[in-house]
């Protein structure tokens, strides 16, 4: 059996690519709003605290998790469904802290996108383009940004409906994942991760 770090470092081209499809943003050459949303997300009407995590939404969510590339799915299931700390996931998978956040953010972004039904919104004037902000959302939520970056993001979010909706949806995606029963998504963990995971579950009091 290969070491965990080998499994997780193995080529997985599905991990590449932006958090949000490039065609959702204006081009870098746009005279007024380079890199800002052309088709921003609109706020979700439904909320994860509704009893709605049964039925169609839960099926969509499980399918979105199942469709993730393996490394993203592993990090997302352990962090957001199972509630592991970043440090625990890094230690188990042999990941650097920054890589763990990148994989987590790409995974959350893909799940969010899979649940997104509509497009709409308005434009704002800010030198931080929306397509850069959306890449930093998990860094922001994990407290990994410098005070200056944090300040810019908070300023942008106060003005930009699209990015504010995007941040809310990443948070809601995380909340919905935390409300998923660990089975059956945990069964999709790589075999050697699953072995460690089952030992961990057997030894620990389940988290709230
Ligand atoms: Zn924006």
Image (cartoon, rainbow, N blue to C red):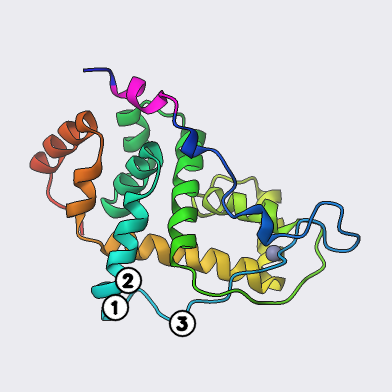
Residue 42, quarter of the rendered image: bottom right
Q: Which residue is mark 1?
A: 52
Which part of the image, by quadrant, shows the N terminus?
top left
- Which residue position holds label 3? 45
Residue position marked by numbered label 2 in the rendering:
57
Q: Which span of residues is magenta-colored?
A: 4-11
For ligand 1, the image quadrant comes to bottom right
* Dominant secondary structure (helix, strand or loop) of the stretch shown in magenta: helix
In terms of image quadrants, where is residue 38?
A: bottom right
Instruction: Compute the Cα span from label 2 to label 3.
Output: 13 Å
Q: Is residue 81 visible?
A: yes
Tag 1 secondary structure? helix
Front-most of 33 and 29?
Answer: 29
Residue pictured at 37% horizontal, 49% vertical: 67
Along the horizontal axis of the image, is 150 left or right of 195?
Answer: right
Report the quarter where the C terminus lies.
bottom left
- Which element carries disc 2, helix, strand or loop? helix
Label 1 CB less than 8 angstroms from ligand 1: no
**CB under 8 Å between callouts 2 and 1?**
yes
Residue for point 61% across, 54% down: 21
Horizontal side, residue 12 vs residue 198: left or right: right
Q: Is residue 138 above or below residue 167?
A: above
Q: Report x, y in % for residue 134.
A: 61, 55
Q: Nearer the viewer, residue 134 or 7?
A: 7
Is residue 9 highlighted in magenta?
A: yes
Indicate which disc, 1 or 3, sits on the residue closer to the N terminus. 3
Residue 16 position within the rendered picture, expressed as x and y whole percent measured from the top left: 54, 38
């Amino acid at each position: 059996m290969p070491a965990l770090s080998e499994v997780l470092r193995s080529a997985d081209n599905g991990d590449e690519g932006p958090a949000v499809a490039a065609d959702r943003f204006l081009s870098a050459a746009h005279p007024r709003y380079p890199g800002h949303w052309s088709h921003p997300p609109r706020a979700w009407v439904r909320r994860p605290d509704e009893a709605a995590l049964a039925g169609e939404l839960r099926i969509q969510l499980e399918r979105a998790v199942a469709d993730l590339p393996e490394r993203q799915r592993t990090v997302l299931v352990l962090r957001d469904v199972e509630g592991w700390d970043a440090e625990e996931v890094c230690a188990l998978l042999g990941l650097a802290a920054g890589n763990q956040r990148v994989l987590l953010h790409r995974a959350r972004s893909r799940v969010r996108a899979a649940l997104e039904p509509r497009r709409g919104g308005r434009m704002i004037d800010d030198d931080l383009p929306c397509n850069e902000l959306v890449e930093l959302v998990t860094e922001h939520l994990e407290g990994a940004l410098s005070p200056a970056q944090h300040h810019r993001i908070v300023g942008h979010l106060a003005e930009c409906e699209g990015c504010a909706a995007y941040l809310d949806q990443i948070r809601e995606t995380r909340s919905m994942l935390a409300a998923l029963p660990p089975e059956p998504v945990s069964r999709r963990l790589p075999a050697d991760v699953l072995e460690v995971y089952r030992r961990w579950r057997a030894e620990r009091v389940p988290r709230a």
